Image (cartoon, grey):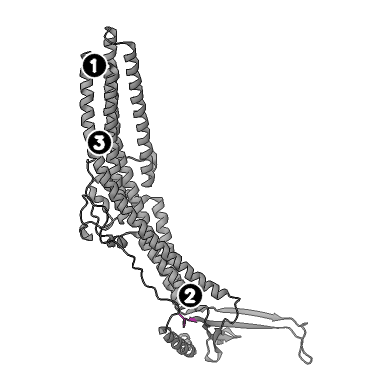
Amino acid sequence: MSALTRHYTRLASGAGAALLAAMALLAGCAVGPDYRPPTPKVAAAYAEKGPWKVAEPRDALPRGDWWTVFRDPELDRLETLAAKASPNLQAAAARRDQAFALANVSRADLLPQLSLDPSGSRTRYSGHRQVPPGVGHSAYTTDSYSLPLDLSYEVDLWGRVRRLDQSARAQAQAANALYQSALLGLQADVAQAYFNLRALAREIHVVRAGVVTRKEGLKLIRIRFSGGASGELDVLNAQTELASAENDLLALEQRRTALTHALAVLCGQLPESFEVIAEKPLVTQPPALPVGLPSDLLERRPDIAAAERTMAAVNAQIGVAKAAFFPDIRLVGSAGYNSSELDSLLHSTSSQWSFAPMISLPIFTGGRNRANYERAKAAYREAAARYQGQVLVAFQEVEDSLSALRTLAAQARVVGQAVDSARKAAALSQFRYREGLVSYLEVMDAERSALQFERLASQLEAQRYAASITLVKALGGGW
């Protein structure tokens, strides 16, 4: 052990003993209410009934990789890309990291703060300075060297620092939950955009087939018009129907381009270099999702977790505000060496130390402490109300999604029947027109109806997948 270390150990022994005694007091009470997690009322089961299945154990799928239930490699690729490159998600991660760093800063205040502040100076005094009578006026120079180890410590007798630490850690946990919420939202947006593209591809295929059919119909009518079997009005109507279908096709192509660009941005990619394979038709019925019990929802949703952690953080601030009514006790000390000669700085005779307990008692603050305390309690009531509101919204979103899935499934069955009937009607009208039994107006009406219901069937597919993804998001993304 060096001489410097031995001297510091001896000089700081008195201050260290006092510090240990003060820290032993920290086992005492901390003012303010201890946090108790809320226990909101939940139903035993969801009101909506449907074809979804009971939730399996949470280890059935990788935690958070909920989209794998769709068994789509392209979707897997897009989700991985978005998680790595999304700027919005990176910003959320940075906010989370900031919160954890601030929690570490708060934790540091629980410990003594030590600093080593060496200094050296040389001062020349003027020979013409004012001095008492009988003292010489000659100029002279002095040196001063100092090597102090300074200590500062707040004796957390009332738990103020501990409550600050509790609040900071809860805020960091809330920030992490908000990051998870942002991740879940990004995953849902990517999946929804992808399935919208696939449904749109089918709708484009339907409309493109309709354009081909109308071109063939126009060609037939022109032949009949040349032979005198049809009038000019039939030709004009057929041209109008073809132009309308071509316009619809162009609009759908533009919509697909815009949706592809939006998906590229979600994945953190430049639109011009982004490629996605979304031509495969959607499975008519989305896979059944494990819904589980309403009580599980409180454990899965990250936004509810964030609201609960915010409650904990605000609750700790009540203790911080209450501690302001009590004395603030601090220990300040210094131990080290001071000498006018550098060679003798580390000699035992150059040692010095000081120790000063400091107490600050609030006597009159003009009502500031009381106002801060009441504000902290009101902030907790606000956080509790927001938590309860978030729980209610969560249950509403799940019930809405379940209801939408049930209704859309029924609509899909009805529209599917309508598609079959409309196709048969269109084929029959074409036959009757070629036989000269009906006008071309009847053919146009039948084909327009068939195209309308086929497009509606494609749109319902997209809506059913969107409702499934919304349900996943409402459930918190894991099971």
Mark number displayed over residue 414: none
> Going from the N terminus, do you reach mark 1 or mark 3 first?
3
> Going from the N terminus, do you reach mark 2 or mark 3 first?
2
Magenta stretch? 154-158
- Mark 1: secondary structure: helix
Three-letter code for the amino acid on which mark 3 is drawn: Val
Three-letter code for the amino acid on which mark 2 is drawn: Val
In the picture shown, does residue 450 fall above or below 263?
above
Q: Which residue is mark 2?
A: 320
- Of badges 2 and 3, the one in the foreground is 3
Which residue is depicted at the point 40% across and 69% down?
312
Q: CA distance from mark 1 to mark 3?
A: 26 Å
The quarter in which the N terminus is drawn is: bottom left
Q: Residue 281: x percent and y percent?
A: 24, 37
- Of badges 2 and 1, the one in the foreground is 1
Q: Residue furthest right?
A: 133
In the picture shown, does residue 155 fall above or below 314?
below
Q: Which residue is mark 3?
A: 415
> Going from the N terminus, do you reach mark 2 or mark 1 first?
2
Q: CA distance from mark 2 to mark 3?
A: 62 Å
Which residue is depicted at the point 35% across and 15% down?
236
